Amino acid sequence: MSYLKAWRAAIVHCIADPKDVGIKAAYEYFEDGLLVIQDDKIHAIGEAADLLQTLPNNTPIEHYPDAVITPGFIDTHIHYPQTDMIGSYGEQLLTWLNTYTFPEESKFADKVHAREVADRFLKELLRNGTTTALVFGTVHKVSVDAFFEACEVHNLRMICGKVMMDRNAPDYLTDTPETSYLESKQLIETWHNKGRLHYAITPRFAPTSSDEQLQLAGKLLSEYDDVYMHTHLSENKDECAWVQDLFPESTNYLDVYDQHKLLSERSVFAHGIHLCDNEYHRLHETGSAISFCPTSNLFIGSGLFKLNKAEEHKVNVGLGTDIGGGTSFSMLQTMNEAYKVIQLQNENLNPIKSLYLSTLGGARALRLEDKIGNLTIGSEADFVILDKKATPLLTSRLALSKGIEETLFVFMTIGDDRAIQATYSAGQCVHQR
Amino acid sequence: MSYLKAWRAAIVHCIADPKDVGIKAAYEYFEDGLLVIQDDKIHAIGEAADLLQTLPNNTPIEHYPDAVITPGFIDTHIHYPQTDMIGSYGEQLLTWLNTYTFPEESKFADKVHAREVADRFLKELLRNGTTTALVFGTVHKVSVDAFFEACEVHNLRMICGKVMMDRNAPDYLTDTPETSYLESKQLIETWHNKGRLHYAITPRFAPTSSDEQLQLAGKLLSEYDDVYMHTHLSENKDECAWVQDLFPESTNYLDVYDQHKLLSERSVFAHGIHLCDNEYHRLHETGSAISFCPTSNLFIGSGLFKLNKAEEHKVNVGLGTDIGGGTSFSMLQTMNEAYKVIQLQNENLNPIKSLYLSTLGGARALRLEDKIGNLTIGSEADFVILDKKATPLLTSRLALSKGIEETLFVFMTIGDDRAIQATYSAGQCVHQR
């Protein structure tokens, strides 16, 4: 049975990319706003003074005078099996994989373990206001079954895939071109577009896949209209050199994926730090997206993402935490670090642009902007309630804020999971602080 | 009347700099430790199994099976009047000062306001486990009175000074060479070595002081054996160029201070990012110290501190939050960012080195290692209790930790003020979560 429910608070959401329309035209803000939900969708959004007059008298209203409602955050790159290895010390990418990642991922052959971690992982995402993520599983098919089963409990819009990896990794963690193709296909048939779930074909990265495996991945991608492709690209300089050694016939790192037909409107490449102009251009041309993962890029010492180059070439960009290379599940803290990465390059990251990257920009990178990413009427009701009084420091600092842009920036700088008072997915409360 | 009290938990503290003796010899660790306090001092430290046998039967013992005790953290550079401007958007140093800092600091002519902020500031420090800090006031003498009065309430070991600034700043925020000398001298006479308090002569930075003011600051420093000098150095490239313009007769930025006799064993220079070998050498030669402020250096886009160069030249280094340029009061989060700054330079910052920098290293930078910085017998009982179960993520991650070094690193990576279960100053509880 259809019902209406409303939340009254300050509301802000992006309706365009600031780079296209300027900062002020990129967002809508309702200082005393009302968000009205019908079942799982946004029914109305606007100033409370206006909307309250049209609302049926018996509509339940939750009033948060000290809160800001934003769309749920979208994390465009994260590894759920790395939840328990966050904060692993002292290595850069390639050693880090061998020392920490591969042993940890081996545990996900056990579905019970996988499900237990998936449940904790989702709880952590929701504590942090993240309602959609593009997620790596492990090489084990069951890791993805476990993850999607956990997502169904909360009716979350999530994307995941089984890792494809047939070389340069321990035996206990490799598949073959054929099994990776078949198992991925089975997972697509089972899970893709089931409820709010989607599948991503997930070769780990070029160095751990043979030509044959990448070719079958490309074949699989061509067999479906709307399946995703999710991998890593140009994170670390040693990695880039290694790719050049392994694929001497490729003109650059991205070209390895390109030659195997893995670039598409639903292809998302994590990192993309060390790219040449041709690579940006080709990403744009194919409608592929980059996931910018600042806490990880700093923690693993990978380098500084060049947002201005991506913008110049009109490449879609979303933000990612990249747990466990990243150091925080919080998209607010990820925005804090994104700001710092851009500052180190003598540029500014406006808080509206940060909000865009972590909501509508992420949705566009995932081609889900007709469903999520902002709060326009008809969108799915994925949103978060940010508490301006979550900590003593937030309370005193925000009391002096002169507008929503400053308020957002303060949340992004000193906010964390505590700032998330509640998280809603498809109109249902999935986290309450 | 003298009394004993004990805390039972894991205990770790540094006894040397890892660069001098190696990681393992730089710290003591007691897995099931006992810390015994007599009045305000450390009376005993060791394994609980040993110490419990010698302790009088009626000694009260607090037992924390899920905690780690460390020395209180030492923040070697912070501005208390900037508490309310944390997270100010979009500028690098010089514009940032004019846009945000100077207007905010003007409010501290009002002692009531100053005291209110000082109280909140100290509460925030203690929430974050910081028991000693080297603190900027404003140009107003009353700002320092207010701060020290607030410190006396908690019996904290704190260092503060009135800003000296007689040019290149708004009229409402400048003093003169003479008034800055006289007022600083009055503050020294009133506060220096009163209880646990110390005074720091505090020229803001070279560009806002005339030659005459810096000369009188040097004169004042020479008039006392153990007064501090606290200022900024080589934070930002535009600043460095400006200093060269303003002081054409100086061979480098540090030389400006050197010519005015402001280098000493109690001189602490914040930042020191863009230094030449001569400057490192001269800092070492004079026993001066640098405060490394990673969250600020990233947030204001200043650059990456070269810890290896400072070590090579044997310069004392402590860590600082540099609130309000910094983005967190938490020294744990400051260690997280310090790690990232070092990773971006292709090196590692070991967690024991981080612990050193934020405890004993900070104490040595401040020449207070005979009083604070570790938990050796006779030291003042400034310590914190870190809760391994402070958040769901800390709980699950630390359950897998393989030793104290990993445990510390995880606290530094994903811990924040919540990880501080309690803070003790001179044996008294000054914060309980």
Image (cartoon, coloured by chain):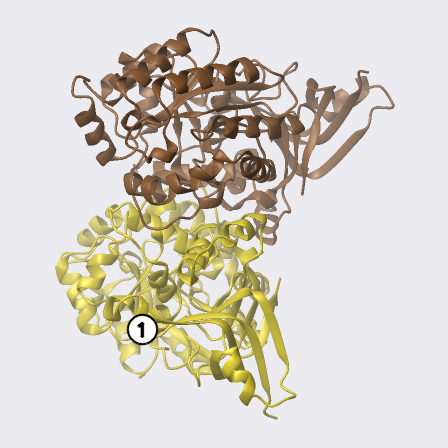
Chain colours: A yellow, B brown
Q: Is residue A244 above or below residue A75?
A: above
Q: Which percent across, then down, holds residue B258?
A: 29, 14
Hey, what amino acid is under mark 1? Ala
Residue that appears at 22% across and 63% down: A311
Considering every residue shown, the one lying at the far bottom of the view is A1
Indicate left or right for B57 with B184 as reference.
right
Tag 1, which secondary structure? loop
Q: Which residue is identified by label 1?
A: A16
> Which quarter of the figure is the N terminus of chain A placed in?
bottom right
| Front residue of this view, candidates A371 and B406 | A371
Which chain's residue wears label 1? A
Q: Which percent across, then down, holds residue B422?
A: 67, 37
| Front residue of this view, candidates A320 and B141 | B141
Q: Is residue A429 above or below residue B340?
A: below
Question: Which corner quadrant of the image does residue B300 belong to?
Answer: top left
**Quick check: can you spot residue B346?**
yes
Residue that appears at 60% across and 38% down: B123
Indicate left or right for B354 with B433 as reference.
left
**Quick check: can you spot residue B21?**
no
Q: Is residue A249 above or below residue B52?
A: below
> Which quarter of the figure is the C terminus of chain A placed in?
bottom right
| Front residue of this view, candidates A61 and B68 | A61
Q: Which percent across, then down, holds residue A65?
A: 58, 67
Considering every residue shown, the one lying at the far right of the view is B58
